[in-house]
């Protein structure tokens, strides 16, 4: 499919000329990266659709940046295949893949002006001067830096340098934009502002984007889908809401947000409900699906905001635990409490609509809503 553009309108400068385009821009099939006896990436497979924003999320050393660099061509895969728009690029050099890459440290040439930095890749590709001038104008206009052409990187703020790095990548008209923790060097306020700008730009221009981050808030707020990685493997691929509400493992639940872990076992299954015996001393019936055999050990996951904190004696009933506050953390819109139960189990609760911040030592009761639990098999159980 060949698409023409009006070069006078920078909003559309990234429309691509692609033959045989299908829904998947990236198809990663069982890619592996070994360094001697160490396996950094272990048979990872996923895809990214046209116009989608997908994040690779995980702790340091999980293989997310190595995966991104294999897709870019900076690291050679030890096994598996990488397709971009249906074309096998596994063994092609970076300049033959038509992908844009934004580095964590921006990688701007300090002695070059903004315009020269943006034009660098275009000159390597031997584009003519008229084309280069137009691309500089278009790309800097898109990222809000028109008029900054003659400045040097040292004359720019961190956020402006990040925009120059993005403009340089976009000037190449990539089929795919790869970003390696591009906001990690910014302070929190600027990082929040820049991720909003990046998402708005990506959405407006329908840029297919693969983004690496270790920041869960960043991934959840920006992405259409998130790929959670751990020790070179994929733990879960899901939309942000599903990832948070329905994690499929203790690792995902612990890495994405804050979670209370309640060990126990399945007592019985009935008609449309399951009975759980949970520590510390709870018998709970839930109508949430629990496809685990009776008698098996389980882990019940409970988000802090799902735990109701009561400071007066509650009415008699099930699913109530008593404890005392041992730590209060005030964050403005929310207070987070650490609560010690009589069985020396610490649960974390999150309270919104704050009337009062309770002091350490305050006795409280906690109500657990049965259908707010997410039940997974205990690690090692099958």
Image: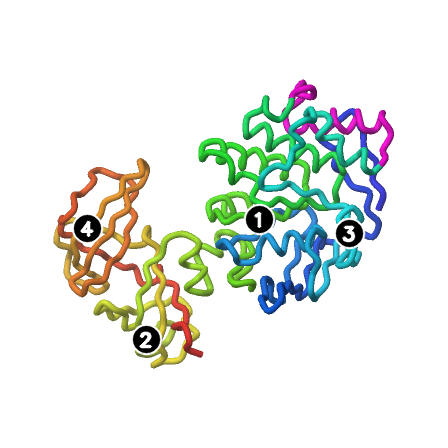
Disc 3 to disc 4, how far (Cα)? 57 Å
For image coordinates 54% across by 37% down, the residue present is 195
- Binning the other alpha carbons within 10 Å of mark 1 as few (below 14), some (14 to 19) or many (20 upward) gives many
| Mark closer to the chain start, 2 or 3 | 3
| Mark closer to the chain start, 2 or 1 | 1
Picture coordinates of residue 310 (x, y %)?
19, 50
- Binning the other alpha carbons within 10 Å of mark 2 as few (below 14), some (14 to 19) or many (20 upward) gives many
| Up-down relation of residue 217 to residue 200 (above or below) | below
| Mark closer to the chain start, 1 or 3 | 3
Q: Which residue is mark 3?
A: 93
Disc 2 to disc 1, how far (Cα)? 37 Å
Q: Which residue is mark 1?
A: 212
Element on which disc 4 rests: strand
Disc 1 to disc 4, how far (Cα)? 36 Å
Element on which disc 3 rests: loop
Disc 4 to disc 2, how far (Cα)? 28 Å
For image coordinates 66% across by 52% down, the residue present is 69
In front: 93, or 241? 93
Q: Which residue is mark 2?
A: 265
Disc 2 to disc 3, how far (Cα)? 53 Å
Is disc 3 in contact with disc 4, using a CB cutoff of under 8 Å?
A: no
Element on which disc 2 rests: strand
Front label number (2 vs 1): 1
| Mark closer to the chain start, 4 or 2 | 2
Picture coordinates of residue 164 (x, y %)?
65, 30
């Amino acid at each position: 499919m060949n698409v023409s553009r009006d070069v006078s309108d920078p909003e559309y400068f990234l429309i691509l000329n692609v033959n045989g385009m299908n829904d998947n821009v990236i198809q990663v099939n069982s890619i592996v990266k070994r360094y001697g006896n160490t396996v950094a990436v272990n048979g990872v497979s996923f895809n990214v659709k046209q116009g989608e924003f997908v994040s690779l999320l995980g702790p340091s050393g999980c293989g997310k940046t190595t995966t991104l660099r294999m897709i870019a061509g900076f690291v050679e895969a030890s096994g598996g295949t990488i397709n971009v728009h249906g074309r096998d690029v596994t063994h092609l050099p970076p300049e033959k893949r038509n992908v844009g890459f934004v580095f964590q440290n921006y990688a701007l040439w300090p002695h070059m002006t903004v315009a020269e930095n943006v034009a660098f890749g275009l000159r390597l590709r031997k584009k003519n001067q008229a084309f280069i001038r137009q691309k500089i104008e278009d790309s800097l206009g898109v990222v809000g830096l028109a008029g900054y052409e003659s400045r040097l990187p040292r004359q720019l703020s961190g956020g402006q340098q990040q925009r120059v790095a993005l403009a340089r990548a976009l000037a190449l008209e990539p089929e795919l934009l790869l970003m390696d923790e591009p906001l990690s060097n910014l302070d929190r306020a600027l990082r929040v502002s820049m991720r909003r700008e990046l998402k708005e730009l990506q959405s407006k221009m329908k840029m297919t984007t693969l983004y690496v981050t270790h920041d869960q808030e960043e991934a959840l707020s920006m992405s259409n889908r998130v790929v959670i990685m751990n020790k070179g493997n994929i733990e879960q691929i899901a939309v942000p809401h599903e990832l948070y509400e329905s994690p499929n493992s203790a690792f995902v639940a612990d890495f994405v947000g804050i979670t209370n872990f309640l060990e126990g076992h399945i007592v019985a299954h009935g008609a449309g409900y399951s009975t759980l015996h949970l520590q510390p001393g709870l018998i709970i019936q839930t109508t949430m699906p629990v496809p685990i055999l009776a008698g098996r050990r389980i882990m019940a996951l409970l988000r802090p905001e799902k735990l109701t904190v009561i400071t007066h004696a509650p009415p008699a009933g099930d699913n109530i635990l008593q404890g005392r506050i041992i730590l209060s953390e005030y964050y403005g819109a929310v207070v987070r409490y650490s609560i010690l139960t009589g069985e020396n189990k610490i649960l974390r609760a999150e309270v919104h609509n704050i009337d009062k911040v309770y002091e350490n030592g305050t006795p409280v009761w906690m109500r657990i809503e049965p259908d707010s639990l997410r039940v997974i098999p205990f690690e090692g159980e099958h």
